[in-house]
Image: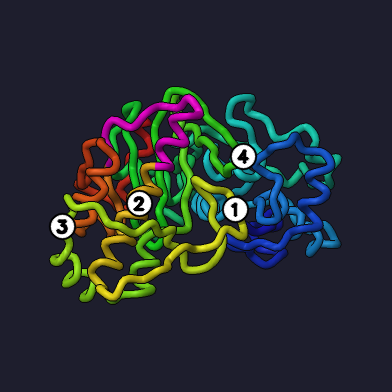
Amino acid sequence: MVLTDAALRPVTRGLMYNSSGFDDEATRIAAYAPDPHITRSSGSDLGRMMRLQSEDPENRAVHMLHQGDFITAKLIARGGLSDHNNALKSGFDPVTGQWPSWAADAGVRIDLLPDVKPTGAALSRISPQRAAHFGLSPDAIVHAGTTDSIAAFLACAPLSSGAAVTSLGTTLAVKLLSPDRTDAPDLGLYSHRLGDQWLVGRASNTGGGVLLHFFSLDQIERLSRQIDPDVPSTLDDYPLIKPGEQFPINGPSFAPRLTPRPKSDAAFLHGLMESIARIEAECYQTIERLEAERPNIIYTAGGGGSNAVWTAIRNCGLSVDIQTPKATEAAVGAARLTHI
């Protein structure tokens, strides 16, 4: 996120999506926002915006731009536009089409907030200068974008209710398409609007990063051949590299559980894989308990999906058909935005 002037020149530093520590801003938001609400945390996007406002004492800023908004603005040579997905965590409500009515009272400069359009909507022709620079047609249309993880979902899965994508990368992320909106801010669970449907999901701090903390890729491949996925592990781990979990447990100080470690490295890896698979199942079960759609097919993105033993272990715990998608790159999903 960055604040810019009318010519799209940054007037503040940029803050990354995982920036945090906006405790003062969170306190001000909490005095006005409903409880629970997606903006009520020390790492919220709205708190990030308020911190940037404080770094613009002369009020030179004209636009607040999320990362996707900044690229869009450069392509069409004007700012002030965003999309349903990028704007959600800043407090925009895709149902009412409004920014929070209490935002100004909390100290937000509402004049900086963008005009938010549905994801995939046509915005404008590309600017002639940008078209010439990139060798594109001057008639090319720029569409409202999305986030990288949602674009990855669109690359993997069809837009049918019950389709789900598990991203087994450094962390574990689940996303499920449903006809109904499901939000549980106390669990960090929220829904993004995609056309007439909702993409509900959240990330856990467990995932492949824990495996790579203990083993190299070559070791994982070699040890996997020693694991029988049909025989349950005797371990009951909660694999985390450091304290703190987001989902299905919302616990900033939640501690890892990785002991006792067996003497056999293969047995330890088996326990880690099975525990991560159990957490994945608990993520989907939590979503289902909140009256959202139950997954009827799960596509796997990320490097973990290439491990056949891990996939077999997940199959046992999920009881849902697991598929490897033809494409997983976010760029493919972005190209599909105009068809949602």
Above or below, 153 relative to 253: above
Mark 3 = which residue? 228
- What residue is drawn where x is 20% and y is 43%? 323
Asked if the residue at tag 3 contacts the one at tag 1, i.e. Cβ–Cβ closer than 8 Å, the answer is no
Density class for disc 1 (Cα within 10 Å; few <14, some 14-19, many ≥20) is few
The magenta-colored residue range is 282-298
Asked if the residue at tag 2 contacts the one at tag 4, i.e. Cβ–Cβ closer than 8 Å, the answer is no
Mark 2 = which residue? 167
Mark 1 = which residue? 251
Can residue 137 be spotted in the picture? Answer: no
Q: CA distance from mark 4 to mark 2?
A: 21 Å
Upstream in sequence: badge 4 or badge 1: 4
- What residue is drawn where x is 70% and y is 43%? 113
Density class for disc 4 (Cα within 10 Å; few <14, some 14-19, many ≥20) is some
Density class for disc 2 (Cα within 10 Å; few <14, some 14-19, many ≥20) is many
Upstream in sequence: badge 4 or badge 2: 2
Q: CA distance from mark 4 to mark 1?
A: 13 Å
Identity, as a three-letter code, of the amino acid under mark 2: Ser
Name the disc covering residue 185, or none.
4
Q: Is residue 57 magenta?
A: no
- What residue is drawn where x is 35% and y is 74%? 214
